[in-house]
Image (tube, rainbow, N blue to C red):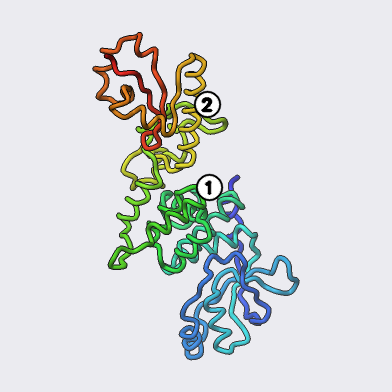
Amino acid sequence: MNAATTISKTTNIKPSFRSVALSLIDPSPTQPRKTFNGIDEMAADIKIHGILQPGLVRPHPKKEGRFELVFGERRFRGAKAAGLTEFPVFVRELADAEVLEIQIVENAKHSDIHPLEEADAYEALHRKHGYSIEDIAAKVGKSKATIYQRLKFTTLVPDVRKAFTDGKLTSLTALLLARIPHADLQKEALAAITKGNFDRDLPSSREAARIIEDRFMMMLGDAPFDIKDATIVAGVPGCNTCPKRTGNQRELFADASSKDLCTDPKCFKTKTDAAWTKKVEEQKKRSLPVLEGKKANEALSYASGYVDLDNAAMWVVRQMMGQKTVAETTLAIDPPRDVLAAARRPT
């Protein structure tokens, strides 16, 4: 039986209504909402009209004789500010998972809750209480894609989270950063998309997406290794099945320009280096030369007498060279162009 099924059976218990001293009520530590605006206005309204809607509490799970506030914290704070000593509430016996679910559903009715607050609450339901994505989506009345995207916000590093809460990022630009799997690259990308132009205007969401795609994603079609090979790096799957390939998580990467983008440039480089090392070892076993660095750059210049066999336009030359010359192939690495195969130009 999953968490959602269990909750549906227990929350049918009818709550009791009473007035409880404000001094006996403690705010809930799992309350998703951390920022409460308009408390002074709420207090002024309470002084005139009183509290029109009771809050919900449960007997405090750790403090005998006290209560934990499940929802109604803005009214609770307003009542304190208004000088009230008692607060009307419904009292219900609730488990921890039930409390969090009720809080999330209640907050889903308000448009001003920050996406990060939603994200942390969904994460608690998903990881701690075993709710599936489908369970959460059904409870809050949102799409699975929205839940996936909110959960991704929990991977934001502290600097990016702060920029998001400070209003420097939109939900879209925050998601673009959250999809980058490394803390240092997230911070680098944050700097790139929050740096204004000469007029100090920040990049639009579309421009931010382009910057991140250009600088922090890799085209798998250009990979100098077999993207289906799951043996290049131990414990790392082939790119075709990796969740960091845009085509494998369309809920998160619906905006990506291609299904074959790698969102982990560090992993891409690790595979590139591993594939190069393997090729070098194979070359050395065949007693064929390997050029790197400056020598590789010099060898691949036109005057060197070598031709680049990885250039698609060289297929005619490949035919002209024949097997004998191809057997003398030299491997060279040129950083901007990754791994290349070169051979002497026929004379």
Which residue is denoted by mark 1 in the rendering?
Answer: 132
Q: CA distance from mark 1 to mark 2?
A: 32 Å
Q: Is residue 319 left or right of residue 155?
A: left
Which percent across, then down, holds residue 8?
Answer: 56, 54
**Numbered marks: total:** 2
Residue 256 screen position, x and y as percent = 34, 45
Residue indicated by mark 2: 231
225 or 11, nearer to the observer: 225
Q: Residue at x 46, y 85 (%)?
A: 41
| Quarter that holds the N terminus | top right
The disc, 1 or 2, on the residue closer to the chain's N-terminal end is 1
Residue 105 can be seen, yes or no:
no
With respect to residue 36, does 243 lie above or below? above
The three-letter amino acid code for the residue at tag 2 is Thr
| Residue 281 to residue 187: above or below | above
Q: Which mark is residue 236?
A: none
Could you tell me if residue 310 is visible in this image? Answer: yes
| View extreme (front): residue | 303
Structural crowding at the residue carrying mark 2, measured as other residues with C-alpha within 10 Å and reported as few (<14), some (14–19) or many (≥20) = few
> What secondary structure is found at the residue carrying circle 2?
loop
Where the C terminus falls, by quadrant?
top left
Query: Where's residue 302, x and y in %?
Result: 28, 27
Q: Is residue 174 above or below residue 165?
A: above
Please tell me which residue lies in front, 160 or 3: 160
Q: Which element is circle 1 on?
A: loop
Judge whether 294 appears above or below 17 on screen: above
* Residue drawn at (47%, 19%) of the image: 283
Q: Is residue 198 left or right of residue 24?
A: left
